[in-house]
Each structure stands twice: as C-alpha cells, then as structure tokens.
Amino acid sequence: MLSTPPLTELEGAALALIKRETALTAYEIKEGFRRSPSSYWSGSAGAVYPMMKRLEGAGLVVSLDESNSRRPRKVFRLTNGGEAALRSWLIDEERAADAGYDPLRTRLPFLVHVERRAARELLDSVEARTREMPAPSEDRHAALVHESWRVMRLAWIAELKCQFG
C-alpha cells in the first residue's frame, strides 16, 4: 500500500465533516465550509470538488450513487484508510500547535506604521465584530469551541488596546 502525504487542513476538515455526518455530497461539504465563521476555509466548488476526487483517488473516501431521480447524488463515505488518515490529522500535535493563519495577528507587528488612533480604531472594530460573530448553531461542540475562541480573542484584544492607548 502506498503511503499518502499528510492531509491538508481542508482535506482533514472535509474528512471530519464526513465522519460527523456519516456520508456527505461534495455540495454538502462545500456548504459546510461556506457556513464557517472563518473566511480561511474555501467553500468554493473549485476547491472542494477536485479535493474530493483526490481523496477518492487516494482511497480515503468512496463515493456511492444514491440518486433517486434523474438528478445524480453521489455521497462520500470514509474508508478504513480515510478513518486512519483522519485520526492522524486530528492528533497531529505539531500541526495543531502551528500558529496558522490569523489576519489580525499578521497585521499587529506592522500597526506601528499607522497613527495610534487608527490602530485603536481597528482594534475597537475587530472587538465589536468578534462580539457579534454568531456561533455555529448546528453543532454544540463547535459552538463551545467558538465561544472559547471568542472569550480568548476578546481578552487578547483588550490587552492589545492598552498598548495603543
């Protein structure tokens, strides 16, 4: 059996969505990403459909025709290899601890290049948007993670605001 390269974050998240729901179409996976509060996830058909073909080609998912009309309905289920790849992705401590993409964190070191007032206004606006960001409603665990993230981010923003007066 050929070893497959480590899953990308998008691939791991797609396999996790399938695991949670047992079976999903590529469209349902795309919509799951589109509903994410993070713009980091690409819910585009141009990202999801080819990814699902790659995952199927790698033997991590299998597609089943569940059409009950003229309209095709192909659902994906995890294979044993997909289950193993998902587990490896979920417990990959090195990648899980990576700083990852965060647009605010990317900007912070460079805010010294704008007026203090502008930096403070940015932080005030990000704080307000963070407070207003709705939690995912379809999954209680995702909502708890989101709320923890929100509390931590608001505490971090409060600390940063002290630096910009």
Image (cartoon, rainbow, N blue to C red):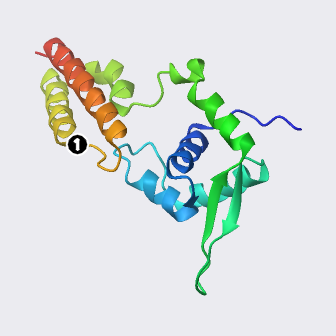
| Residue that carries the numbered disc 1 in the rendered image | 133
Label 1 CA crowd tier, 10 Å (few <14, some 14–19, many 20+): few
SS label for mark 1: loop
Left or right, residue 160 beside residue 70: left
On screen, residue 100 above or below 32: above
Q: Nearer the viewer, residue 40 or 25?
A: 25
Residue 57 point in image, percent of width and height:
78, 53
Q: Nearer the viewer, residue 119 or 82?
A: 82
Residue 106 point in image, percent of width and height:
39, 27
On screen, residue 4 above or below 114: below
Q: Is residue 7 visible?
A: no
Q: Residue at x 74, y 41 (%)?
A: 81
**Residue with the most extreme bottom position:** 70
- In this rendering, the count of numbered labels is 1
Left or right, residue 101 beside residue 163: right
Q: Residue at x 34, y 50 (%)?
A: 138
Residue 40 point in image, percent of width and height:
44, 42
Which of the image's four quarters has the N terminus?
Answer: top right
Which of the image's four quarters has the C terminus?
Answer: top left
Q: Residue at x 73, y 54 (%)?
A: 56
Q: Is residue 75 visible?
A: yes
Image quadrant assignment for residue 153: top left
Kind of residue at disc 1: Met
Q: Residue at x 63, y 58 (%)?
A: 76
Left or right, residue 66 beside residue 132: right
On screen, residue 96 above or below 126: above
